[in-house]
Amino acid sequence: MQKRFFLIILILIVILIIINIIPGLSEGLGNFVYKIFSPFERVFTKAGNAIIGFFQILFSIGDLNENNLALIQKNIELETENARLRDIEQENIELREALSVSKSNYQIKEAALVVGKDLQGIRDWILINKGSKNGISKDMAVISPQGALVGKIAEISGDFSKVMLITDKNSIVAALIEKNRTEGLVKSKKGGLFMDFIPNTENLEKGQKIITSGMDNICPKGILIGTIEDVDESDNQIFQKINITPAFNFLKLERVLIIK
Amino acid sequence: MKIASIIIFIAVLLFIQIGILTQIEILGVYPNLILLSVLSLVIVRGWRKSFGWIVFSGLFLDLYSLQNIVGTAVLAIIMSSALISFLIQRFFRKTNSISLLVAFFFSIVFYEILLIIFLRIFGIDPNFSLASFSIKIVYNIVFALPIFHLIKFYVGKFWKI
């Protein structure tokens, strides 16, 4: 009995080794399982979002009045800015037409649904339902429907792709601070993003936008990454470091766009 | 009827894991209900009788860790299941809440350490910090007893021991 059981374990180990050794077998197995489970996972995630959203509303009722006043004030400011930007946009359209330049720096390749997330928290990766069959290739940039940077394609199978989020510890994005055009690298730390080695001479303020610089040849220039959360000058006299609030909530991500 | 109940139970478990728990993460960490269920099943039914579930759950965790390596979670969950089975049989024959928590604690820590070792062997650098590791253990321990009692109830009612 004991011997038979160890034999089963040995056979299992051999099978696992074979799955990993034969090229494409583990990806194929993954593709097959994702195809079966992704519809359920999507339903579960949507239902989970609804439940979590309900409780978030319930807990935030006390702050609604205060938030409402702040939003009214913000709305007035945004309307003013909007009017100014509409003028600039019109001017921009005219100039682009005159110079024959395309409207954005990128082209949308595919829209995809988020159908999975790393269940063990080993890496900040998500699974989307478009793969090599849809013309997706490695290192393509992935953005949210609102145009904020999500990450890049890390691995592909036939019908699915795995996206490395910008919050993953191995993610590095070439970026610049929109207002003063200071360039740097946005990296991840647990729970957020940061950009360091910014000269102390730069005047940085909370809320300034961080966008992609396009220098890494993966993300086109001008995609929103996030805003400055705080500036950490600490004991370093030469450089300062900024903590960045990502432009969107990764937990609520349901759809993404793959761009090239 | 029994099969339907087991399928409903697994669906509910996956719903909580995928739909709810991944959204209430702390420092990127959320409890692993699948691991806790397997460990509970091992305590209630024994290691050998639960072997199929152990392997199946490990495979599911492997594939939904979005790695291209299949087997790290399978091996880690087999070994941690063996550990909890050994601890219960050898040291905690009369189980109470404290002994269960101790057994869960050692098995979960063992699982997480094995997983990190196996992933590193395959060249995968997992998100790891002492803070998130500690939170993960505590977070799992908090859920361990409710899951254990749920599994015990379900096994008693729908799975013949």
Image: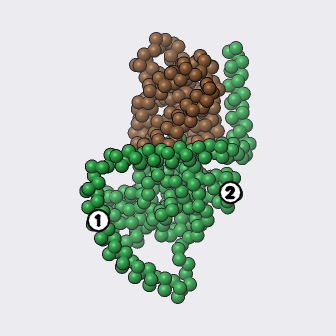
Q: Is residue B12 left or right of residue A192?
A: right
- Which chain is home to disc 1? A
* Placement of the C terminus of chain B among the 4 image quadrants: top right
Q: Callout 1: 10 Å neighbours few (<14), some, many (20+)? A: few
Q: Vertical placement of A36 versus A137: above or below?
A: above
Whether residue A87 is visible, yes or no, is: yes
Q: Which mark is residue B66?
A: none
From the top left corner, tell me how far across and down residue A68 is, in percent.
Answer: 29, 59
Using the rendered view, name the quadrant where residue B51 is placed: top right
Q: Residue at x 52, y 39 (%)?
A: B15
Q: Between residues A8 and A44, which one lies in front from this camera angle?
A: A44
Q: Is residue A257 left or right of residue A58?
A: right
The colour applied to the residues of chain A in this rendering is green
Q: Residue at x 56, y 84 (%)?
A: A100
**Real-space CA distance between mark 2 and mark 1, rounded to the nearest whole angstrom:** 46 Å
Residue type at the position of mark 1: Ile
Q: Which mark is residue A72?
A: 1
From the top left corner, tell me how far across and down residue A160 is, in percent.
Answer: 64, 52
- In primary-sequence order, the first of circles 2 and 1 is 1
Output the letter for the chain in brown.
B
Q: Which mark is residue A132?
A: 2
Whether residue B118 is visible, yes or no, is: no
Q: Callout 2: 10 Å neighbours few (<14), some, many (20+)? A: some
- Which chain is home to disc 2? A
* Placement of the N terminus of chain B among the 4 image quadrants: top right
Q: Vertical placement of A33 versus A196: above or below?
A: above
From the top left corner, tell me how far across and down residue B160 is, in percent.
Answer: 60, 18
Q: Vertical placement of A161 versus B106: above or below?
A: below
Q: Residue at x 50, y 29 (%)?
A: B36
Labels 2, 1: front one: 1
Q: Secondary structure at mark 1?
A: helix
